[in-house]
Amino acid sequence: MERNFIERKMRTYLIIVSIFFSILVFRLAYLQLLQNDKFSTLARENRIRLVTITAPRGEVFDRNGVKLVGNQPVYTVSLVNPGRKNIDDVVEKLAAILGEDPGEIQQKIDQQKRSYEPVKIATMIPLDIVTRIEEQRMELPGVEIYVEPLREYPNGNLLTHVMGYVRQINEEQLAANKDKGYKMGDPYGQTGLENTYEQYLRGQDGGRQMEVDSLARPVRDLGIKEPVPGNNLLLTIDYKVQKVAEEALARASQQAIKEGYGEARAGAAVALDVHSGQVLALASYPSYDPVKLAGVLSQKDYNDLFNSPLKPMLNRALLPYAPGSTFKMIVALAALESGLVKAGDTISDPGYFFLGRTFMDWKPGGHGQVDLIRALKVSCDTYFYQVGLKIGIDHIAGMARQFGLDKITGIELPGEDAGVVPDRDTKIEQRLYYLDEKSLAKVKEINQRYNDLLSRTTDENERKSLLSKKSDELREIEWELDWHDYDTIISSIGQGDNHYSALQLANYIAAIANGGTLYKPYIVQKVVDFNGRIIKENKPVVLGQVNVSPQNLAIVRQGMYEVTQPPDGTAYGFFTGFPPVAAKTGTAEVDDHEPHALFVCYAPYDNPDIAIASVLEYAGRWRRICWRLTWGCLCLASRRKINLKEAILVII
């Protein structure tokens, strides 16, 4: 009995063991035969890495071959296989080493659409951080360090507003370029030429397949596809001229501040070749460091760049300013072309002009008898008050439009603003834009009140009286929308609804200098691949021909030349030792601030080569800083064989 019980028990155990081994054998067979490919792939993926080799962006050179923007190798931290189970621990530890917020790292992981690709976590990693990561590699599975090319600026902050900056592509940009092979973490031109020429500057990434050990350290290369560098840009910019332009703006600001103009902390300057539209220099002050924008921004750096009242990210060379007296050549040409004014016609300037109110000249006591050429020489406001009123705003606005002042120039930089030319339509547009809610509510209140009163009366005389009163009250508000002689008068000296960028001013001066041809300004001469093959070449483009007689252009050029001549030209004394220069000074009034200082010129007067426009915000009358802004004549130093050291001494 007992023996039978033991035998049954043994048979039961044998059956259970047999079933267990049968399941085990079946599972092993399934894994080896049916799942072999899957597990072979997993094993291979654990020991084989496909690493992207980021292609260096194209380099940038000035017109003489001076390198302006290049590339340098930097350390980049990436995360491979971010879907692993212990990813939260890895993120926490990596964030502590990098000094970043774990949430920001997790956000980068979440944004990666293709899980098989490494997620770029940080770039420009210093060597001490690289060392710490390597020391803790056992605790950081999936964290890898690569060397990638990053933008290098041999000349510091020079030309930053022209070149712009490069930063990792954002979600919006990635969506807009979804068919162009971009992925999160890729560099992307954000502003300036880096943005406009992104498709040319961007290279073709390569890749490396390598075997790694259990700690993800490289063991051997299994294959490589070399990256293709981006295309290079050859600019029209002259490095020497650009450098002097930026330094002169900074010195002009410092000098104006010393003289009591504390807000004179920003400005712009542009130099153009008058025969082609090539940009020799385009400077905006203050500048910024593009390297800081490539990596993680500290809160201080972010505030300095984006929240500073100086707004260093703005390219002020493309922003409109009131032109002040630099607009007077437009009025002079409009007057001559109208046939209503001759160059020899004179007016008597007592220092003011009266028409319902007094309009003062900048010089107390006035300039006496002045004709057109002398009016330009001494910048006589009273002359232009009267001439502008005589010919009317339509002639003035028409001439401004011929010189392209009402539209963008079309330069290959993002963010250019069109100019504002004064006329009736512009005034209505501007006033309606700025008409505040209080004024609109007042109009509504007047209409409702008088409509209510009118509905209560049947007396015709009373109705006429109410309608007259309503009209008077509305007219007080609507007066601002009408064009008046007052508007023509102030527009004639570059105030009122007059706003143009330094680039537009330089381009209009270039057209005066070259005989009336308006060119499209451009900065890039050629796009060249890494083998030297020309991919794209820009040539001069004529935007239009100004319909002004050569005789009238010659008269205005003579007036500009007189500005630099003794005894009382407003820029006399600043160009001693230089070739003859034709110029115009300007002061643009700003409500509740000191005026902006402006200066335009072209040179040489007898054989025009270069046109220049400069502006320094809140710097008072131009005399206090004009000698700093004559940097433009250094353009001649590189092109007319003037001694550069002597020229620099004149400026400094």
Image (tube, helix red, strand yellow):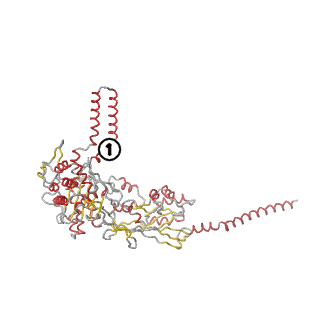
* Res 159 visible: yes
Foreground of the two, 493 or 207? 493
All told, the count of numbered labels is 1
Taking 141 as reference, is 337 left or right?
A: left
505 and 144: which one is in front?
505
- Tell me the quarter of the picture where residue 276 sits: bottom left
Callout 1, which amino acid?
A: Leu
Quadrant of the image containing the C terminus: bottom left
For the residue carrying disc 1, how many other residues have a C-alpha within 10 Å: few (<14), some (14-19), or many (20+)? few
Q: Position of residue 218 (x, y in %)?
A: 52, 71
Residue at (43% x, 65% y) in the render:
126
Quarter the N terminus occupies: bottom right
| Secondary structure category for the residue under label 1 | helix
Which residue occupies the extreme right position in the image?
1
When asked about the image quadrant of residue 530, the answer is bottom left
Q: Residue 23: image x %, image y %?
A: 72, 63
Tell me which residue sits at (70%, 64%) in the image.
Answer: 27
In the rendered image, residue 345, in percent from the top left (x then y), is placed at 13, 53
Viewer-side residue, 587 vs 222: 587
Q: Percent from the top left, x then y, of residue 189?
A: 40, 61
Residue that numbered label 1 is attached to:
432
Say left or right for 348 vs 151: left
Q: Is residue 250 visible?
A: no
Please name whichever residue, 588 or 27, is drawn nearer the observer in this view of the structure. Answer: 588
